[in-house]
Image: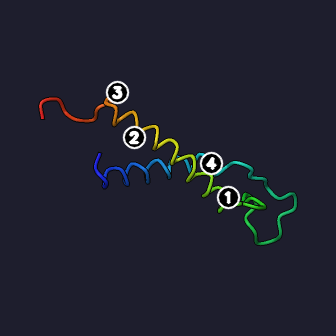
Amino acid sequence: MGPVSAVVTYVVLWWIVFFMVLPWGARLPDNPEPGHEVGAPEKPRIWTKVGVTTVIAAIVFGIFWVVQDAGWISFRVPGS
C-alpha cells in the first residue's frame, strides 16, 4: 500500500468511525430555549469525540495495514 492510498484509507475509516461515535452521550435538553433547535444536544463534546475517533480509527487502520501487508487479503487484480 502506497502512502496516498494509506492516507485515503485512514481518512475514510476516520469519517466512518466519527459518524459511529457522534451519537455517544448525546442528551437532549429538557427545556430548550426559544429559538434553539430542540434536537440539538446539551453538551456535544465534539473534541472528545474527535479524539476518540482518531484513536479508534488508528487502531482499525493498524489492523487493516497488518492484514493487508501480511497478504491475508489482497486488493490486487490477479495477473497484473
Lower sequence index among marks 3 and 2: 2
If the image is split into quadrants, where does the C terminus sit?
top left
Residue lying at the far left of the rendered structure: 79
Lower sequence index among marks 1 and 3: 1
Give yes or no for contact between labels 4 and 2 (Cβ–Cβ under 8 Å).
no
Amino acid on which the number 1 mark rests in the picture: Thr
Residue on which disc 3 sits: 72
Q: Residue at x 58, y 51 (%)?
A: 53
If the image is split into quadrants, where does the N terminus sit?
top left
Amino acid on which the number 2 mark rests in the picture: Trp
Element class at badge 1: helix
What is the number of the mark on residue 65? 2
Q: Residue at x 60, y 58 (%)?
A: 50
Disc number lying in front (4 or 3): 3
Circle 1 packing at 10 Å, graded few (<14), some (14-19), many (20+), is: few
| Gap between marks 4 and 3 measured at Cα | 29 Å
Amino acid on which the number 4 mark rests in the picture: Val
Lower sequence index among marks 4 and 3: 4
Residue on which disc 4 sits: 21
| Gap between marks 1 and 2 measured at Cα | 26 Å
Element class at badge 4: helix
The answer to whether residue 33 is above or below residue 11 is below
**Where does the image place residue 58, in percent across and percent down from the top left?**
51, 48
The answer to whether residue 33 is above or below residue 44 is below
2, 21: nearer the viewer: 2
Q: Residue at x 74, y 50 (%)?
A: 25
Circle 2 packing at 10 Å, graded few (<14), some (14-19), many (20+), is: some
Residue on which disc 1 sits: 48
Disc number lying in front (1 or 4): 1
Circle 3 packing at 10 Å, graded few (<14), some (14-19), many (20+), is: few
17 left or right of 31 in image: left
